[in-house]
Amino acid sequence: MIDYLREIISGTWSLFVGLGITIKYFFQPVVTVQYPHETLPMTPRFRGHIELVKDAETGETRCIVCGMCQKACPSNCITVNGEKREGVKGKVLTEYILDFTKCSLCGLCVESCTPSAITFSKDYNLAGVKKEAYIFDLKKRLEAKN
Amino acid sequence: MSAFAESEAKETFVLNLGPQHPATHGVLRVKLTMDGEYIVEAEPVLGYIHRMHEKMGENRTWAQFLPNTGRMDYLHALAFNHGYVSVVERAAGIEVPERAEYLRVITSELNRVSSHLLWFGAFILDLGGFSPLLYVFDDREHILDLLESVTGSRLTYCYFRFGGVYNDIDGDFVAGARAFIKRLRGRMPMYHNLVTKNIILMKRLQEVGPISAEMCRKYGATGPVCRGSGINFDVRKHEPYSIYPEMDFDVPVYEQCDSMARYMVRMDEIEQSLRIVEQALDKMPEGPVMAEKVPKVLKPTKGDYYHAVETARGSFGVRVVSDGSNTPYRLKLRSPTYSNLSLYGEACRGMLLPDALALMGSLDLVIPEIDR
Amino acid sequence: MYVDPEIIRLLAFLIGVIAFAALNAAYLVWLERKEAAHIQRRIGPKEVGPFGLFQPLVDGIKLMTKQLIVPAGVDPVLFKIAPILVMVPAIMSFVTIPFSDTLVARNLDIGLLAIFAFASVNVLGLLLGAWGSRNKYAVISAARVVSQNVAYEIPMLVTVVTLVMISGTMNLSKIVGLQMGGFWHWNIFNFSASPLMPVAFLIFFVCMLAETNRAPFDMAEAESELIAGAFTEYSGMGFGVFFMGEYANIVIGASVATILFLGGWDCPFGLFPGVHWFLIKMYFLIFTVIWIRWTYPRTTFYGLLNLSWKILIPISFVNLILTSAMLKVF
C-alpha cells in the first residue's frame, strides 16, 4: 500500500519535473539558423568537390598529369588527359574530368597529388536537374574563374 | 492481461513490419506472426541494403577500401575506420606514432558520444516523445562541427590512414572539445530528469524485453546488449588496442537484462567516453601524425589477420586474408548489429507489439551495418 | 413580419459558435506547431504570412483540394457519416457553455449532463468510421479507443459528481456564480469541501486528455505503431474534419475544466470579471495540453488502462467519499 502511494507521488513529481524542463526551453532563444536567409561560415577543411589550384607564380595549374589521382580514386571518377607540347618539359594538362556523381569525398586523390595541384572546394550549393551538370571539367572551371 | 487460450488452435496472422517503417532504423523487414496482440514468432528479413562491401574489398586496393568503412555504420564511422586500419597495420607491420593514436582515440570517442546521443533521440522518438530528439541534435551539432573542423566531413568520415591520421588538430579543436565536454556534462542531468526518471518511460522500459545472459552468449551479442545482461565484455578492456590501456575508464554493466538496463548502459557510456577524451587531451604528446615509411602501394605479407574494436554497437571484427598483392584476397567484416539482431526472433516470443518495438529500439540497430 | 428576438439571438449564437469552433480548430494547429517548435528550440511556420499565421489557411486549402477517396467495399453511409458524428457533438456542446454571465446560448439547467452526453457520441463516431472502413487494423484501433474512453469516463464523471454535490446544481452559469470573487473561492482551492480538490482537478485534466485522445494517450493515432489508426482510410477533407473534431473536443474539455474548477470568467483578484478571463484561462489550459504532448512519451495500451482502473478510479472514489463526509459533517 505504501509502495503504491509512494510510486504515485514520485511518478507525479517526475512528470512535473519534465514539464519544467520543456517550459524552460520554450522561453530560451532558438538555436536554429534560418537558412537560406542566414548562412554559416564553412570550416577551412570542409570537403566539397575537388578543384584545381591556381598557382600564384605561373597563374596556371600545377598539374603534371602523372595520373596518381586517377589511380588512387576508388570509384574511377577522375580522368586526366594531357599532351606533350614543344618547349615545355613534361605533359601539359588538356582536360581534367571529375564525375561527381560517383565521388565519395574520401580525399585519397588530394592526398596522393605530389605537386598539390588539387584541393577541396567549399562548394555545397549543388542542386541541379541534369546528370551532365555534375560531370565537371576542372580545367575549364579554373579558367572560367580567372 | 490474459494468458494464451492453449486449448483451441491458435488463429494466427502474419503482419509485416515492412521495410518502410518509421520504427525500424533503416530498411529492415520483420515478419511477425501474431496471435491477436501477442507475437508468436518474429523473423527479421535482411538484405534490402546489401551493397557488397566485402566483394568491393576484393576489387579495390587496400587504400581504396577506406571510404567504404565509413559507410557501413555511418553513426560510428571512425571506429569502423579504426578496425580496418588497425588490421592492415598489423598485416603490414606499420608502427603508428603516438600522437596519431591519441588523435584516433579522441575522435573515435567523440564519434561514439554522438552515436549514443542519436540512439537516445531516436529511441525516445519511437516511444512517442518528440522533443528529446531535437535537444540531442543540438548537442550533436557541436560534435559534428568539431569533427568537421578536423576531418572535413560530418558523418561518413574517411580520416584514418595506414600509419596515422590524415590531418593534425589545432588549439581551437582542443578548446572546443573541452568546452563541449563541460557542456554535455551539464546537460546529462537534464536528460535524466526529462526522460530516465519519467514514470511513463520507466513503465515502458522496465521489465520489457528481457534478454538473458545465455541468450547473449548463444547468439554472440556484444556491446551494450550483453553489458545490459550482466556480461562484462568490452573489447577495449579485454583485448586492448591503441592507447586504451593507458586510459582510466569504467565499463558500465547492469544485471537487470531488460530494456532499461541497456538504456542505462549507453547513458553511462557517454560519460565514460567523455572521461577518455578528457584524459587523452591532457596526455597527448607532440609529434608526427603519420608514420614515416608507409609505402604508397601497400603489399602486406601473406597471411590471415584479425583485429576487433569496440564500436557503439558492439565488437566489430575485421579479418583480412592477404596474398601479397595490392588488393585483399578476402575481407570479412564481422558486424556487431547482425549478431545483436539475430536474437530478436527468440527474444520476442510472447510479447506485445509495443514492447517488441521498444526492444528493437533498445538494441540500437543500424541496418546498413547489418547488410554491409 | 414579426421575428422573435430570441430566434435572432439563437441564430447569432449558432453562427458565432460555429465560427468560434472552426477558427479554434484551424488556429489551434498553428498554436500547436509554434509551441512544439519553441519547446524544441526552433521556429515553427514562419514563411507563410507573418509568424506563419496564414499556414492553417493554406493547409485547409490543401486538404480541400485533395481527392476524397472512398475505397470500394466500404459501407458508404457509415463511412461518410462518421466524421460528421465526431464534429457535430463538439459543436453542439458549445450551446450550453457560458463564456460570461451574459454570453451563453442556452443556459440549460442540466448543462453539465448535456455536455457529457454529447462527449460520448464522439466515440461512437470513431467506431462507426472504423467499422465502415472495412480495415482490420482500423477496427482494432477503434476498439482500443472505445475501451480507453470508457475507462476514463468513469473517474471523470465521479469527479464531476463530486463537484455537483458541492455546488448543488448542474447549471454551468450557477456553478461559476458560486466561485466568484477571487481565486480563493475557486473550486480548485475549495478545501472546505474536500482537501483533495487540486487532486480532483488533476484527475479531471488527465481524463480530459484521455477522452480527447491526446498524448500521452494517443494510441489511436500513434505514428510509430504498426496499426495506422482509426483514420487509415480517410483522405483529404474527411481526415480534416476528424482533426477539427479533435481540436473542438479539446476546446470543450478546457472550457468545462475552466468552468468547473477555475472559476469561469472570474478574475483571480475579483476585480473585472468578464469573457476575457474565461478565454485566458481556457487558452492556458489548451497551452498545457499541447505542452504535455511534446514532453512525454506514449503510454502502452495496458499502462493506460492500468492508470485508469487502478489509480484514477480509486482516488476519485476516495475524493467522493471524503467530500460527502465533509458535506455531511460540516
Image (cartoon, coloured by chain):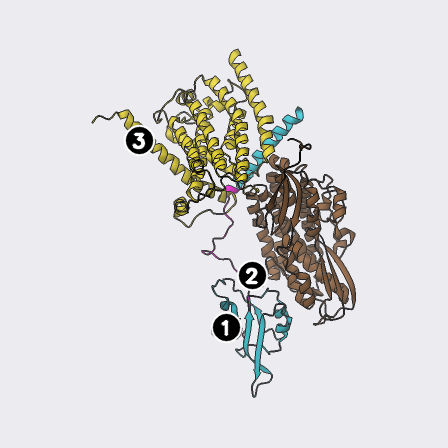
Chain colours: A cyan, B brown, C yellow
Say which chain tag 2 marks.
A
Q: Residue at x 63, y 68 (%)?
A: A74
Residue lying at the far bottom of the rendered structure:
A87
Q: Amino acid at mark 1?
A: Arg
Callout 2 amino acid: Thr
> Which residue is at the front of the view, C144 or B118?
C144
What segment carries the magenta color? A25-49
Residue B286 versus residue C40 in the image, above or below: below
The answer to the question of whether label 2 and label 3 lie on touching residues, with beta carbons closer than 8 A, is: no
Q: Which residue position is annotated with label 2?
A: A43
Q: Which residue is mark 3?
A: C12
Up/down of C270 relative to B92, above or below: above
* Residue underneath mark 1: A141
Instruction: Give x and y (percent) for residue B204.
Output: 63, 37
Do the residues marked 3 and 1 share a common chain?
no
The residue under label 3 is which amino acid type?
A: Ala
Image position of B107 (left or right of B213)? left
Query: Image quadrant for the C terminus of chain B?
Result: bottom right
Residue A26 lies in the magenta-colored region: yes
What SS does tag 2 mark? Answer: loop
Disc 3 packing (10 Å; few <14; some 14–19; many ≥20): few
Q: Position of residue B212 (x, y in %)?
A: 74, 41
Chain under label 1? A
Task: Check if residue A6 falls in the magenta segment.
Answer: no
Neighbourhood count class around disc 1 (C-alpha, 10 Å): few under 14, some 14–19, many 20 upward: few
